């Protein structure tokens, strides 16, 4: 699929369902990540999840969290929230350097929506023992980069 067709399909997703979920595979020692594009059109932050997790599950989590955020008119940053359909919580945290995240991770938002300034919340998964990145003893698979 060429770039123009891809961008049109992503924009159609935003028009049809309110957002597009973009997954980016791992490469050169960098983990995979997924993010939303479209929440900012409604005045809510885009969501970013970094880690080599199953993209279908991550897309479900990002969609459900986006829907909840918009339906409840509540921004989730700084909160530990239930992971949709799971016993494990997730942490929703404001990114520390939004400009870097927009330039490095969430490029599609500007590409399809022509929006350059928007908030981003990083969704962080805990390991099976409930530990988050930075906690002592976290399983290495879950010890992802906080941006």
Image: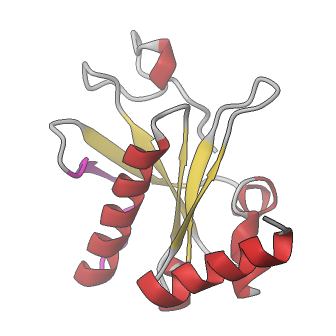
Residue shown at 69% from the left, 62% from the top? 106
Q: Main secondary structure of the magenta part?
A: loop
> In the rendered view, would you say 31 is above or below 120?
above
- In this view, the residue in front, 107 or 81, is 107
Q: Residue 4 in the image: x percent, y percent?
A: 83, 78
**Quadrant in the rendering for residue 103:** bottom right
- In this view, the residue in front, 34 or 128, is 34
In the image, taking residue 2 as reference, residue 19 lies left or right, namely left
Confirm whether residue 110 shows in the render.
Answer: no
In this view, which residue lies farthest toward the front?
1
In the image, taking residue 72 as reference, residue 33 lies left or right, namely right
In the image, taking residue 7 as reference, residue 12 lies left or right, namely left
Q: Residue 55 in the image: x percent, y percent?
A: 48, 44
In the image, taking residue 22 as reference, residue 115 lies left or right, namely right
- In this view, the residue in front, 97 or 66, is 66
Q: Residue 94 in the image: x percent, y percent?
A: 52, 57
Instruction: Classify the position of the C terminus by image quarter.
Output: top right
Please tell me whether residue 87 belongs to the stretch shown in magenta: no
Magenta range: 73-84
> In the rendered view, would you say 53 is above or below 3?
above
Residue shown at 79% from the left, 53% from the top? 104
Residue shown at 46% from the left, 87% from the top? 16
Confirm whether residue 29 shows in the render.
Answer: yes
**Quadrant in the rendering for residue 57:** top left
Instruction: Classify the position of the N terminus by image quarter.
Output: bottom right
- In this view, the residue in front, 146 or 36, is 36
> In the rendered view, would you say 112 is above or below 21?
below
């Amino acid at each position: 699929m060429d770039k123009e067709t891809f961008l049109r399909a992503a924009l159609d997703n935003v028009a049809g369902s309110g957002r597009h979920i973009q997954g980016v595979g791992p490469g050169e020692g960098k983990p995979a990540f997924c993010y939303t594009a479209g929440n900012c059109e409604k005045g809510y932050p885009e969501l970013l999840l970094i880690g080599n997790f199953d993209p279908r599950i991550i897309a479900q989590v990002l969609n459900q969290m986006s829907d909840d955020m918009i339906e409840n008119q509540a921004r989730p940053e700084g909160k530990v929230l239930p992971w949709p359909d799971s016993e494990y919580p997730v942490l929703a945290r404001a990114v520390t350097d939004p400009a870097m995240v927009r330039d490095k991770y969430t490029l599609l938002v500007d590409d399809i929506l022509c929006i350059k300034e928007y908030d981003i919340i990083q969704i962080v998964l805990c390991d099976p023992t409930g530990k988050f990145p930075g906690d002592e003893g976290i399983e290495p698979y879950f010890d992802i980069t906080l941006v």
